[in-house]
Amino acid sequence: MGGGSIKILLAITQAFALTMSVAFIVYVVVIVVPYLRRKPAPVGDAADFTWHFFVPCRDEQTVIRETVRYLRSTFRHAHVWVVDDDSEDRTARVVRSIWRRNGGYDPYLHLVPRRRPEARTGKGDALNAAYQALNDWMGPDASRDDVVVVVVDADGRPAANCLEVCAADHLFGDETIGAVQLDVWMGNADTRPPGKNWFSRAFGLKLAQMQDLEFRTAIAAIQTSRGFTGTISMGGNGQFTRLSALDSIAGPDEQPWRGSLLEDFELGVHLLTAGWRTGYTPDSHVKQEGLYSLRRFLVQRTRWGQGTMQCSRYLRRIWDSPHVSTLGAAEMMYYLAQPWMQLLGSLLYPIPFILLLFSTAGDPAQVWTWFADDGAWILFAIYGSFGLLPFIVWGPIYQFKCLKSRNVLRGLGMGFAYALYIYTFYITSWRALFRLVRGRNGWSKTRRNTEHAPGVKVALDS
């Protein structure tokens, strides 16, 4: 291959890559502005609604005791439904021990046991079991429009103000709102993990901080911008749903949650296409455990990426829905395209550098002339900058807005670390594709940080 051909290939691949990068930069600018300009909204009266927390559990003995105690002490008039998905540890026994108090029983705490073969088939099925148990407990004649189901992970800590925030007039006070998603924080973002190896402890802490940065800035900004497109999506933790909205999509089998590995986004698709509106609020939050282990993190994100790929089957449903605007459909399609774009990007972005190395090996002098004298270095500089800037910007934003710190250098350092962190998604997208192709669609639980580490307590209290 001659030098001219290599230059043409370089130009073509860089043009594609730059086009994708510029489009992404524009997207980042569009979502950053409303995120930074948003002001806190008025709250409502939590007593206007009845609240039911659903806590799906599969081998969660290390965290479930403190979670149940937190929920029962913080939200005294809310019901807590713990779903034991045929755990192989002491999860159910721990819940029963809390249930018995002062010689009596806690009427606000409910255990929903599941057994194989029906159990351990996914988080959505566990939530459906809680929904069916709630229906049986309430009876057919109970009022349902003022009942709200709250999905909380076994390590979740919803902020004490979350009920009054979600009861506001612009959220569940609006009868067209079917679901609301809280902001998500990592409760251990400032807690160094245990261990004697200083590198693993430093790396684990930084990984947890990157997850906190991701949720509190980039994801929060995306959710805020979705308020304009009407496509706010649900998360698996801190997800509030009106019971009548769940009824409208449950069907005769009483299953509002479906079989995707991304059951939270899937629920949002069904609600939106059924005519419900969804809301998002950063005025309250739910804390969860950020992962210290890169291996566990990759397992978790592979599951999320595979779930997104599975939800591609709803593209036609979204596009044909009269309840989703054209702009909203385009936004949802852009989201569903993300893992596929990451696959394409992982193939496309390295090509200019590979061709440059190949060309340099063949004729170093000519390449140096082209690179230095003809100004090709400028093109590569722009290429690299456009690939990094959309991610680096979140570091200073996180530092100023979330941590209330004006340390610019640390903010830039967090931004560069976040850019490296994002590139792990190229790995998880390929892993997700391989699992999808091989038909491995089972739900893989991500182990908690405290599992296999007795005596370690992660700081998650709000």
Image: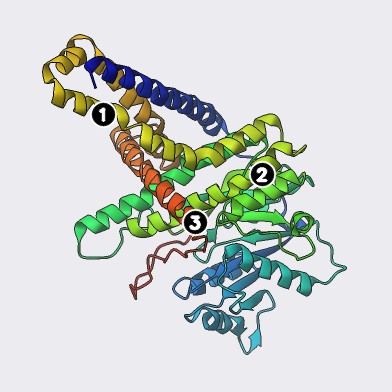
Q: Choose mark 1 or mark 2, whichever is in front.
A: 1
Q: Amino acid at mark 2?
A: Gly
Residue holding disc 3: 287
Note whether residue 38 is visible. Answer: yes
Q: Give the mark nearest the N terminus, 3 or 2.
A: 2
Q: Choose mark 3 or mark 2, whichever is in front.
A: 2
SS of the residue under disc 2 = strand
Horizontal and vertical percent position of residue 344: 43, 36
Corner quadrant of residue 378: top left
Residue holding disc 2: 279
Horizontal and vertical percent position of residue 334: 56, 35
In the rendered image, the vertical position of residue 28 relative to residue 304, given as above or below: above
Please say which color scheme the image uses: rainbow
Q: Give the mark nearest the N terminus, 1 or 2.
A: 2
In the rendered image, the vertical position of residue 29 relative to residue 81, given as above or below: above
SS of the residue under disc 3 = strand
Q: Give the mark nearest the N terminus, 1 or 3.
A: 3
Corner quadrant of residue 21: top left
User: Residues under labels 1 and 3: Cα distance?
Assistant: 41 Å
Camera-side residue of 17 and 138: 17
- Residue in the image at 55% along x and 84% along y: 97
| Horizontal side, residue 412 vs residue 358: left or right | right
Horizontal and vertical percent position of residue 248: 79, 55
Note whether residue 228 is visible. Answer: no
| Horizontal side, residue 185 vs residue 412: left or right | right
| Horizontal side, residue 216 vs residue 166: left or right | left
Camera-side residue of 357 and 385: 357
Callout 2: few (<14), some (14-19), or many (20+) C-alpha neighbours within 10 Å?
many
Q: Amino acid at mark 3?
A: Lys
Residue holding disc 1: 353
